[in-house]
């Protein structure tokens, strides 16, 4: 049936509207597709520019021991990451390595690949056997295995939480865990007022005439506590056999010479400051004991022998310490001081044991 002009016009407008609507929808879809593609490209670009890294999750101060529990992962832009950034899971163990005789195994990263060198010598690269997990160097085309010991990695400077710990912010401690290291406790040393657990100290012997000797160098201290209260006169330190004997000798001589002070001095930036060189020389009896003591490692024996036979240090001992001992001759004073120390240690120990057996008071 033929349609009238009005119907044909209406149909044409309808078709035209459909075509226009389809065109508009197509343009909208195309624009949406282009926008989605752009967003996807930007997201990919953002993802490619980001990296998962480790940052500190707490504040640390110079000289603090570092371990992996101090770090958390975050997303960071690649441009914000230091060139010497290294995963602490790799960095911390690498900074802890020494040979058993005390030689450093240094770490260097080239394009993210770790290289180890004996005493920093590029011609003596150290490798790790993947099967035995032992370290070795190549000599005459053969594996020459190295006995290793560890020392803690420490923060070189103060750092706040969320700091990215790069290689340049980490140092190695001089606290090598050799077989003869033991935790020792002392209450005979004058301590700084603000000394806290984790601080590094030198133990020094000051004579009445003003002479001052370094007995033990750069040792990290722990302040023991009893029932939540820190002992004010007691510290704990990890010492090797030769250090134990040296400090014991200094304690006895501090008791014998009236007006002598055995005291601790703090390092202000333990991560940056190198350990002092000990200047105290033990007496003849202790020197002979050290020489025959199989517990003292050869490197320590050699260092002690060199110090004991140094003309300068030996003459200082004869001139100041030995002469002071001759003048004092205070055996009774030494016995009194020694007994006071023993009594103080026993009292502190009793408090500690009582704290272990004290009933637990339930909290509401």
Image (cartoon, helix red, strand yellow):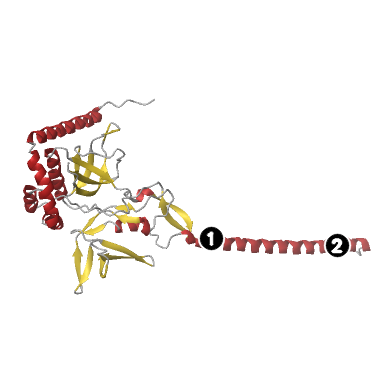
In which quadrant will I find the C terminus?
top left
Residue 241 can be seen, yes or no: yes
Q: Is residue 31 left or right of residue 85?
A: right
Answer with the quarter of the image where residue 336 lies: top left
Q: Residue at x 32, y 48 (%)?
A: 268
Q: Residue at x 34, y 26 (%)?
A: 362
Which label was assigned to residue 46? 1
In which quadrant will I find the N terminus?
bottom right
Q: Residue furthest bottom?
A: 140
Q: Eyeballing the image, is 154 above or below 327? A: below
Seen from the viewer's position, the closer of residues 296 and 338 is 338
Dot placed on the residue nearer the N-terminal end, 1 or 2:
2
- Count residues near mark 1 (Cα–Cα under 10 Å), then give few for <14, some for 14-19, many for 20+: few
Given this view, does label 1 or label 2 mark the residue nearer the observer? 1
What secondary structure is found at the residue carrying circle 2?
Answer: helix
Q: Residue at x 79, y 63 (%)?
A: 20
What secondary structure is found at the residue carrying circle 1?
Answer: helix
- Count residues near mark 2 (Cα–Cα under 10 Å), then give few for <14, some for 14-19, many for 20+: few
Q: Is residue 305 left or right of residue 233?
A: left
Q: Residue at x 11, y 34 (%)?
A: 333
Q: CA distance from mark 1 to mark 2?
A: 48 Å
Q: Residue furthest front?
A: 209
- Residue picked out by circle 2: 13
Residue 35: x percent and y percent?
64, 61
Residue 256: x percent and y percent?
11, 39
Residue 149: x percent and y percent?
22, 56
Give the number of marks: 2
Residue 128 can be seen, yes or no: no
Q: Decide: marks 1, 2 in contact (CB < 8 A)?
A: no
Residue 135: x percent and y percent?
23, 63
């Amino acid at each position: 049936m033929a349609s009238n002009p009005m119907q044909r016009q209406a149909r044409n407008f309808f078709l035209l509207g459909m075509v226009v609507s389809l065109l508009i929808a197509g343009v909208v879809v195309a624009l949406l597709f282009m926008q989605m593609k752009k967003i996807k490209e930007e997201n990919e670009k953002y993802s490619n520019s980001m990296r998962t890294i480790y940052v500190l999750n707490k504040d640390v101060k110079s000289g603090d021991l570092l371990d992996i529990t101090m770090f958390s992962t975050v997303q960071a832009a690649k441009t914000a990451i230091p060139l010497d950034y290294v995963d602490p899971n790799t960095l911390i163990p690498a900074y802890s390595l020494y040979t058993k005789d005390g030689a450093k195994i240094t770490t260097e990263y080239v394009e993210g690949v770790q290289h180890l060198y004996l005493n920093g010598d590029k011609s003596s690269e150290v490798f790790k056997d993947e099967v035995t997990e032992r370290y070795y160097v190549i000599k005459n085309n053969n594996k020459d295995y190295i006995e290793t010991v560890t020392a803690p990695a420490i923060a070189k400077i103060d750092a706040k939480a969320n700091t990215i710990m790069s290689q340049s912010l980490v140092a190695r401690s001089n606290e090598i865990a050799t077989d003869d290291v033991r935790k020792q406790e002392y209450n005979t040393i004058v301590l700084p007022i603000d000394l806290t657990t984790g601080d590094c100290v030198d133990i020094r012997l000051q004579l009445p005439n003003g002479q001052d000797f370094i007995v033990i160098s750069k040792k990290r201290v722990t302040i023991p506590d009893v029932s939540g209260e820190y002992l004010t006169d007691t510290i704990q330190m990890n010492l090797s056999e030769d250090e134990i004997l040296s400090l014991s000798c200094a304690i006895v001589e501090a008791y014998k010479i009236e007006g002598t002070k055995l005291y601790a001095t703090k390092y202000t930036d333990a991560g940056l400051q190198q350990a002092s060189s000990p200047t105290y020389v033990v007496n003849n009896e202790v020197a002979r004991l050290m020489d025959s003591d199989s517990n003292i490692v050869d490197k320590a024996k050699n260092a002690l022998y060199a110090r004991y036979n140094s003309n300068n240090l030996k003459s200082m001992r004869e001139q100041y310490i030995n002469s002071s001992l001759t003048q004092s001759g205070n055996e009774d004073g030494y016995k009194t001081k020694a007994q006071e120390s023993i009594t103080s240690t026993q009292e502190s120990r009793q408090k500690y044991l009582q704290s272990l057996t004290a009933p637990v008071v339930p909290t509401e």
